[in-house]
Amino acid sequence: MTIAIAILLIIGVFFAFIGVLGILRMPDVFGRLQASTCIATLSTLCVNIAGILYIIQNGLSAGSAVKLGLLALFVLGTNPVSNHALCRAAYRIGCKPAKPFVIDDYKDDFGDSAQVEDNADKPDYEFDEPQKEDTEEEDV
């Protein structure tokens, strides 16, 4: 059982590493969100299963195994939903994919009324630059 625990931990670390590479290498926000969901779902699931097996192997508290199992179910239920909500919000504010969508279901939902933001696809460092604004104080 120790070998199974080690294999699950290695698989969990592998998915986390691949997910981090995906976040760094993906060309657009939609790919990065998919990569981050890979980390949170697959990596966490493998590590939780390894933890449950470790608890069973060493005869530790059954409550801890139940907590890890519930945590795994919570992660499996919430990560895909939150990823969908984030992708939908990114589409709605006007983030553009690196390549055109093959199937664009969001266009049916939002039509042409989706808010388009001019700087939605700018790199992070461009957001940190101060914006030039006219700041005139009004006399009260």
Image: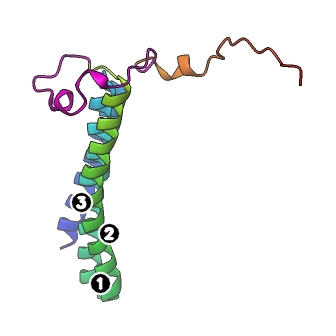
Residue at image coords 34%, 40%: 86
Residue at image coords 35%, 31%: 90
**Residue 18 point in image, percent of width and height:** 27, 38
- Which residue is nearer to you in this view: 66 or 4? 66
Q: Element under label 3?
A: helix
Amino acid under label 2? Leu
In the rendered structure, find residue 58 and report the number of the disc placed on it. Answer: 1
Amino acid under label 1? Asn
Residue 3 picture quarter? bottom left
Q: Earlier in the sequence, mark 3 or mark 2?
A: 2
The stretch in magenta equals 98-120
Dot 1: within a 10 Å radius of its alpha carbon, few (fewer than 14), some, or many (20 or more) residues? few
Q: Tell me the distance, in whole angstroms, between the alpha carbons under discs 3 and 1.
A: 26 Å
Asked whether 67 falls inside the magenta stretch, the response is no
User: Is 35 displayed left or right of 24 in the figure?
Assistant: left
- The mark total stands at 3
**Residue 70 point in image, percent of width and height:** 29, 73
**Quadrant of the rendering where the N terminus is positioned:** bottom left
> Residue at label 3?
76
Q: Are marks 2 and 1 in contact (CB under 8 Å)?
A: no
**Residue 7 point in image, percent of width and height:** 20, 59
Residue at image coords 34%, 88%: 61
> Residue at label 2?
71
